Image (tube, helix red, strand yellow):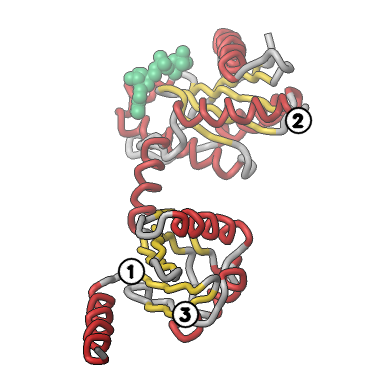
Amino acid sequence: MTQDIDNRAERYQAILELTRDLLIVLDGESVIMCRAGESEWVNEAVITGLTLDTMLSDELLTKVRGTIERAQAAPGTVQSIEYVLRPEQLTMLHEAGLREPTWYEARFVATPSGEVLWSARDINERKKLQRKVTNQAQRDPLTGAYNRRALVTVMEQTVAQAQRYDWTCSVLLIDVDDFSKINEQHGWDAGDQLLQQIVTGLYKLKRTADFLARYGDDQLVLFLPETNHEQGVAAAERVRRLIQELEMPYPTGELQCTVSVGVAGLRGLEDSAPDMLKRAEESLFIARNSGGNRVEGEV
Ligand SMILES: Nc1nc2c(ncn2[C@@H]2O[C@H](COP(=O)(O)OP(=O)(O)OP(=O)(O)O)[C@@H](O)[C@H]2O)c(=O)[nH]1
C-alpha cells in the first residue's frame, strides 16, 4: 500500500516535470504547492504559502475567485481565463520575481478532494503578435499614421463620449496643395517622402490625445478631442504654418509644399462623426478653391 502511494507520488512528480506551465495547487485560498515551469520569474518558495488576496489585485482576485467557484461547482471540468500580471499592481508577485507585465492563459480544475489545480501558460508572444496584427490593420503602411478605418472608430467613440459629458471636439481635414505636381516633377518616391515628413511634423506638433490619420491619397485628418471650433481653427493655422515652413532636401531639388485645411467642430447632440467629416470636407473645398494654403472653418 505504502509502495503504491510512493509510486503514485513519483508518477505525479514525473507528470509535473513534463509541463511547461506555471502550476499552483490551492487548498481553499492558500497556495500549498507551486512549480514555476517555464515562467522564469517565479520564486516557488515565495509563492508557496501565499493566499489569493495577498497575491492578487482586487480586480484579478474577483476574476480568479469567480473561475475557481465555477471549477468547484463542477469538479473535473476545466475553466479557462486570460489575464495579465502587472508588477506595479502586484506587490507580492513583484517580490516573488515578477518584473514585466506578463499575459497568461490559465486553466483551473477542482479535484474531488477539494483542492484546486491552477495551471498558467505564458502567452506573451501570442499577445505581442496579436497587437502587431491589430496595429498593422489600423495603420497606413507608408506614413505609420492611423488609417481611415481606425479614425472612424475613434471619432465615433469620442464624439459619443463628448455628447454624453457635454464636452467638445474638432476635426481638421488637411490636404496637400498640388500634390500630384510634386509626384510629376520629382517622382512618386519624392511624394512618398514628403508625406512621411508631413506626418513626422504633425506628430511633433500634436498633443498626446490628438489622433492623426491618413484620410486619402494626399489628405490627413487631425482629430482633436476636447477642442472647440475656435481652438480647432487656431490649431489648423499652426498646421498650415508648420507645413509652409517645412523644407525637404531631395536630389532633384528642395521640396516644399503648402496645405489647405477644413475645420469642423462638434455641433451638439444631433451631430455625428460622419457629419463632422462632411462639414470639414466642405470647408476644405472652399479653402482649396480660394487658392490653397488656407484654413477654412464652418460653412
Ligand atoms: N507619392 C504618392 N502619391 C500618391 C500616393 N497615393 C496617391 N498618390 C497620388 O496623389 C495624387 C493626389 O492627387 P489629387 O487628389 O488630385 O491632389 P492634388 O494634386 O494635390 O490636387 P488638390 O488636392 O486638388 O490640390 C495623385 O496623383 C495620386 O496618384 C502615395 O501613397 N504616394
Q: Nearer the viewer, residue 4 or 92?
A: 4
Q: Nearer the viewer, residue 123 or 73?
A: 73
Spot occupied by residue 167 in the image (x, y as percentages of width and height): 75, 29
Spot occupied by residue 84 in the image (x, y as percentages of width and height): 48, 59
State which quadrant residue 202 falls in.
top right
Marks 1/2: CA distance? 46 Å
| Position above or below: 91 against 5 | above
Q: Viewer-nearest of labels 1 and 3?
A: 3
Residue that label 2 marks: 165
Indicate left or right for 89 with 119 as reference.
right
Under mark 3, the amino acid is Ile
Q: Are marks 1 and 2 in contact (CB under 8 Å)?
A: no
* Residue 180 visible, this angle: no
- Element class at badge 1: loop
| Position above or below: 239 against 60 | above
Quadrant (top left/top right/bottom left/bottom right) for the C terminus? top right
Marks 3/2: CA distance? 49 Å
State which quadrant residue 159 falls in.
top right
Marks 1/3: CA distance? 17 Å
Which of the two discs, 1 and 2, labels the residue nearer the N terminus?
1
Q: Nearer the viewer, residue 99 or 188?
A: 99
- Element class at badge 3: strand
Q: Which mark is residue 253?
A: none
* Residue 137 visible, this angle: yes
Q: Are marks 3 and 2 in contact (CB under 8 Å)?
A: no
Q: Viewer-nearest of labels 3 and 2?
A: 3
Residue that label 3 marks: 32
Under mark 1, the amino acid is Asp
